[in-house]
Image (tube, rainbow, N blue to C red):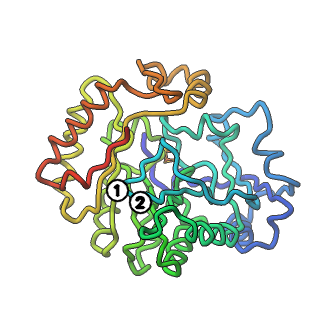
Amino acid sequence: MSRSENYFLPDFSHIYLESAAKEYEFTNLCLDRFSNSKVVEIPDYKSVFNRPGQDFQTQKRSMKLILAVKKPPFIYKGSNMLQDGGFRNFYYNTPILNCLYNCDYCFLQGMYPSANIVVFVNQDDMEKAVESEIKIRPYLDEPLMLSISYNTDLLAFENILPMTRLWIEYSKTQPDLNLEIRSKSTMFDSISDIESTDQVLLAWTLSPEKVVNKNELDTPPLIKRLKAVQKAIKKGWRVRLCFDPILLYSDWEKDYLDLLNQIKSEISFNEIFDITVGVFRMGQDYFNRIRKTKPESKLYYQKYINDAGVITVSQSDREAVEVFVRENLSGFIPEDRIHFWD
Ligand code: SF4
């Protein structure tokens, strides 16, 4: 069942506070916000986060918050698992590790030994790294596109910490910086007072309601995400729609056709900046790790191929997805505004 945002908002019974993270503004905000939490000071966040023998899904049911100071690197080049959406200077960073949501297909389950949420409080260091990278980006006549919501859903966190707001405000001080903020959240209201800017791409992942309920645990329902999209467009933001991953199961075409038709009836496609489309894919190490811990999840027991270390669907299935999307969006959005992962 999909739940409302407030219902599952964790109360964080414990906050692990790295000694070096004391006195940062984000730290104080979190400690005020969760004043009933038991605060445990630790020398290094990894002593808690990387502890052996943790069970990701058990921890998901009672996530703890870890406040820490990030050490370099503060910015990373986009990987082949990410879609650059046509931006050639494509990077990501990790202001938060882990997510309030719990999608079945999420690679974070295989990437991290813990489901606890790490917030890096040293925003200044991340900003300085962005400024240095802007200067040496490969294509100097194009902006640096930074995905700030790669290892988390940053906007979902906005009523805990105003990180999305700060990054947007920061981008306005850097003319050569663009941001992609990908989300399933309905928290647009918490940033709707900010003046929109073409430097920021607000990207919503949309899935059929059946997929939301079955595979995107704790995320807001489709209809609420669509409302957030509508509001963002109305306020003048650039909006990207992400059908990523499109999950393949019997009759997937029917559910995704219903999804596209619902979107067509609620949103004018000529107001959408672009669309990204992808299929299930995951590095083989993460996939194998998750598969062992999720015997009940059909997703990890389907037929996949190993494409140079990436577990994904067959080439013919990828082509079927591409044909399906192109056919059903033909005439609604120019073809070159639809980006496919491959
Ligand atoms: S919203 Fe994104 S980061 Fe969060 S659990 Fe789902 S796939 Fe992972």
- The relative height of residue 129 versus residue 101 in the rendered view (above or below) is below
Residue that carries the numbered disc 2 in the rendered image: 186
> Residue 254 or 90: which is nearer the viewer?
90
Residue 218 left/right relative to 60: left
Closest to the observer: 248 or 142?
A: 142
Query: Callout 1, which amino acid?
Result: Lys
Looking at the rendered structure, the secondary structure element under dot 1 is helix
Q: Secondary structure at mark 2?
A: loop
Amino acid under disc 2: Thr
Query: Of callouts 2 and 1, which one flags the residue occurring earlier in the amino acid sequence?
Result: 2
Pick the quarter of the image with the N terminus.
top left
Per the model, the C-alpha gap separating discs 2 and 1 is 6 Å
Q: Against 88, is 108 above or below?
A: above
Q: Position of residue 62 (x, y in %)?
A: 66, 44
> Which disc, if any, is residue 224?
1
Please tell me which residue is depicted at 45% across the width and 63% down the height of the picture: 187
Residue 283 in the image, given as x and y percentages of width and height: 54, 32
Disc 1 crowd rating (10 Å Cα; few below 14, some 14-19, many 20+) is some
Residue at (74% x, 34% y) in the render: 54
Tags 2 and 1 in contact by the CB under 8 Å rule? yes
Q: Residue 9 in the image: state x and y as whole percent.
A: 57, 54
x, y percentage for residue 239? 33, 63
Q: Is residue 304 above or below residue 236?
A: above
Q: Residue at point 36% right, 24% down?
A: 314
